[in-house]
């Protein structure tokens, strides 16, 4: 049963990332509400309204048809324009920043909700239009339904104004990086909080996995998520420990060994474990914080490319990376899941030194000849060295990256070289 609910949550999370998710739900709600209003009109709801507020009810069938037809035509034009704006946003974000940003922009709930309001209102007005007979008297016209259709259309105009404001904000690179940073911060904090609840002794005594039994993956895709509690329950029932050999975010090929166990497992047990590992064709920061580092790094690299040449954006990207690295340093590199003092699962993680290398390797390639950006990278490494309770391995990784950076930087100005070298020497001495 738990596996079933886990799959439902995973399926729901995948659906939420689709641009048509909320529009489909709100369209269905508009259709159902239109049917409910047709039934209510048969019960005489408009007759009650015309007796209380006669000025709010349309008294002529031709006028009602004209009003709703105008609303429908206008909303369709509004919706087409809004969809075009969304596609323009996605195109510009892909070409100017990074194609990896598209899943996050597509899953923007504000855009989905506004498009859904348009569709829901159009569907409601269409079915209300079907229920109007021009020959009917004012007491038999669906006056209340028509009034609601006009009100919904006015709400759509307000939503359109908000949409224009929101789309103009969404295309700004600072807001894009803010969204990436916020999602990564939430994921990292939840991971750090989980680790803080785990006993250090339990983590340190996880056995060596070199000679354990290996199991291959029955499917391919990005390793996106894991239902830890379900797998822990399997481990407790079978009295086993398991080691997942690939970190989150890595693309797993079919029949590649991704799972190890300290005991030989039956096929049913292996199948049950893999049913709690989620493989998908897309990557999401909510499941893998490492993707945030990749996306922000790609924004900085794209900004420093000869075709764009925007060092200001690269410097802003490094600021976000600095904060994310500082938060990442609060997390250990062990990846152990335990319960009641017993470790059951160990999962491969992207170590801090590897993550720092991947980011710095890309930035060094494109930023080594710009003094301001190179200086910003050195300041980032200096800030990371000043973090409280920094682990020795983290300190060594930072010093190593600083030395490599100094070897590749090259400026025509001797003053720039002296400034960079002096700044780096001060950091290495601390």
Image (cartoon, rainbow, N blue to C red):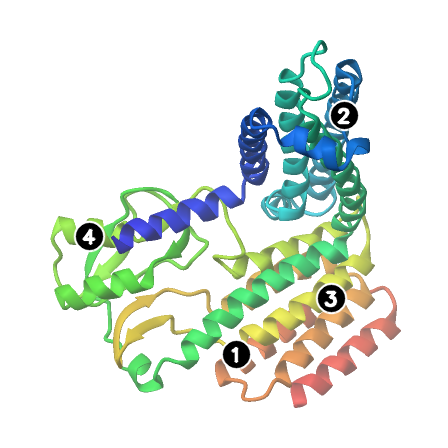
- Mark whose residue sits in front, 1 or 2: 2
Dot placed on the residue nearer the N-terminal end, 2 or 3: 2
Report the Cα–Cα distance between label 2 and label 3.
62 Å
Say which residue appears at 61% left-offset and 84% top-offset.
Answer: 387
Q: Is residue 299 above or below residue 135?
A: below
* Residue identifier under label 1: 330
**Which of disc 4 and disc 3 is earlier in sequence?**
4
248 with respect to 154 (left or right): left
Distance from the alpha carbon under mark 1 to that under mark 4: 33 Å
Secondary element under disc 3, as helix, strand or loop, is loop
Looking at marks 1 and 3 on the same chain, the residue that comes earlier in the sequence is marked by: 1
Pointer 2: residues within 10 angstroms few (<14), some, or many (20+)? many
Q: Which residue is depicted at the point 61% across and 69% down?
A: 324
> Which disc, if any, is residue 209?
none
Residue 198 sits in which quadrant?
A: bottom left
- Check disc 3 and report the residue beneath it: 409
Residues at marks 1 and 2 touching, judged by CB atoms closer than 8 Å: no
- Judging by the rendered image, the residue that carries numbered circle 2 is 71
- Sequence order check, earlier mark of 4 and 2: 2
Q: Is residue 158 above or below residue 35?
A: below
Mark 3 Cα-neighbour bin, 10 Å: few <14, some 14–19, many ≥20 = some
Q: Are marks 3 and 4 in contact (CB under 8 Å)?
A: no
- Indicate the position of residue 221 as horizontal and vertical percent values: 40, 44
In-front residue for pair 179/293? 179
Q: Position of residue 379 (x, y in %)?
A: 73, 76
Q: Taking the image as drawn, is residue 332 in sight?
A: no
The answer to whether the residue labelled 2 contacts the one labelled 3, judged by CB atoms less than 8 Å apart, is no
On residue 270, the disc is 4
Q: Mark 1 or mark 2: which comes first in sequence? A: 2
How far is the residue under mark 1 from the one under mark 2?
55 Å
Residue 411 lies in quadrant? bottom right
């Amino acid at each position: 049963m738990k596996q079933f609910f886990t799959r439902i949550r995973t399926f729901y999370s995948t659906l939420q990332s689709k641009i048509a998710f909320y529009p489909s739900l709100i369209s269905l709600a508009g259709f159902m509400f239109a049917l409910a209003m047709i039934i209510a009109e048969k019960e005489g709801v408009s007759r009650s309204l015309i007796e209380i507020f006669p000025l709010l009810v349309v008294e002529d069938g031709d006028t009602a048809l004209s009003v709703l037809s105008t609303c429908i035509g206008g909303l369709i034009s509004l919706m087409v324009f809004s969809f075009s704006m969304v596609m323009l946003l996605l195109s510009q974000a892909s070409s100017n920043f990074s194609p990896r940003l598209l899943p996050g922009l597509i899953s923007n709930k504000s855009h989905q909700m506004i498009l859904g309001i348009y569709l829901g209102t159009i569907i409601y007005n269409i079915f209300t239009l079907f229920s109007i007979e021009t020959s009917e008297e004012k007491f038999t016209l669906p006056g209340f339904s028509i009034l609601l259709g006009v009100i919904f259309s006015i709400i759509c105009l307000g939503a359109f104004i908000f949409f224009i404001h929101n789309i103009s904000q969404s295309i700004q690179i600072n807001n894009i990086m803010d969204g990436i940073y916020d999602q990564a911060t939430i994921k990292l904090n939840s991971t750090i909080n989980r680790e803080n609840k785990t006993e250090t002794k339990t983590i340190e005594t996880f056995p060596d996995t070199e000679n354990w039994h290996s199991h291959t993956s029955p499917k391919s895709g990005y390793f996106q998520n894991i239902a830890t509690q379900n797998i822990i329950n399997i481990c407790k029932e079978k009295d086993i420990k398991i080691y997942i050999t690939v970190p989150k975010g890595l693309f797993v090929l079919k029949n590649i060994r991704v799972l190890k166990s300290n005991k030989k497992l039956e096929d049913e047990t292996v199948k049950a474990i893999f049913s709690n590992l989620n493989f998908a064709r897309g990557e999401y920061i909510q499941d893998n914080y490492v993707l945030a580092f990749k996306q922000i790094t790609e924004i900085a690299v794209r900004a420093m490319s000869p075709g764009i040449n925007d060092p200001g954006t690269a410097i802003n990207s490094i600021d976000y990376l600095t904060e994310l690295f500082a938060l990442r340093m609060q997390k250990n590199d062990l990846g152990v899941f335990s319960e009641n003092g017993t470790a059951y699962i160990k999962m491969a993680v992207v170590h801090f030194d590897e993550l720092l290398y991947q980011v710095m390797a890309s930035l060094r390639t494109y930023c080594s000849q710009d003094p301001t950006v190179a200086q910003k990278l050195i300041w980032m490494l200096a800030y990371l060295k000043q973090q409280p309770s920094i682990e020795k391995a983290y300190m060594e990784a930072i010093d190593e990256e600083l030395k490599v950076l100094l070897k590749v930087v090259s400026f025509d100005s001797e003053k720039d070289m002296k400034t960079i070298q002096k700044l780096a020497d001060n950091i290495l001495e601390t």
